[in-house]
Amino acid sequence: MADKDKEQLQAGAQPTAPGEATPAGGEAPQPDADEKLAEAIRESAREDDPKPSPTLTLRKILGGDILNAQLVRSQIWLVVLIVLFTIVYVAFRYQCQQDMIAIDKLETELKDAKYKALSSSSALTERCRESHILEMLKNNADSLLHPAEQPPYIINVPEEEQ
């Protein structure tokens, strides 16, 4: 039947509605049939939304029928704004987590540096003790340095007034 319709269209004949017989001799269909065909075309070419059914089913939601509703079309900018805020929220949270990881790493490095400084300071204090220095001088026999046998003198110098 589809081949027959194509041949009629190529020959310049007007298509007929389904279930309608073509008059013999290639005559034009009856005016009643034209009106039915025009009405069917008008019905299918409507731009407004069909009336939504009162029941909302999972099949309609997953099938996308809910997105054709006038309510969703009128609120599209709200949906776009919510999506934008969600993206910004996720991006800021990710950046915050990265900063927290960097802070933790730097705090660990700071602790390690403090411990190194403390151990270096204690080692230096130990080496600079008088008892340790005297022990080193005793062990090094060729050294000209030796501990003083007399206590140091205090010399008072009077200040000259001008």
Image (tube, rainbow, N blue to C red):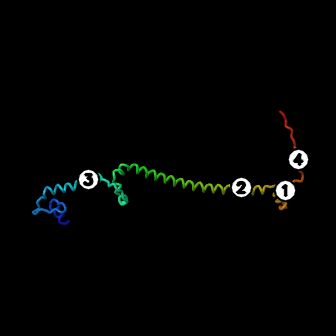
Residue hosting label 1:
145
Q: Earlier in the sequence, mark 2 or mark 1?
A: 2
**Viewer-side residue, 84 vs 73:** 73
* Residue named by callout 4: 153
Task: Calculate the distance from the C-alpha at mark 1 to the C-alpha at mark 4.
Answer: 19 Å
User: Could you tell me how far apart the alpha carbons at marks 2 and 3 are, in whole angstroms?
Assistant: 84 Å
- Which circle's residue, 1 or 4, is located before the other in the chain? 1
Question: Of circles 2 and 4, which is in front?
Answer: 2
Amino acid at pointer 1:
Leu
Q: Which residue has dot 2 on it?
A: 118
Residue 47 lies, in percent from the top left, at 27, 52
Distance from Cα at disc 3 to Cα at disc 1 = 112 Å
Spot occupied by residue 23 in the image (x, y as percentages of width and height): 11, 62
At label 3, the amino acid type is: Arg
Q: Nearer the viewer, mark 3 or mark 1?
A: 3
Please count the marks in the image. 4
Residues packed near mark 3 inside 10 Å, few (<14), some (14 to 19) or many (20 plus): few
Specify the quadrant that holds the N terminus: bottom left
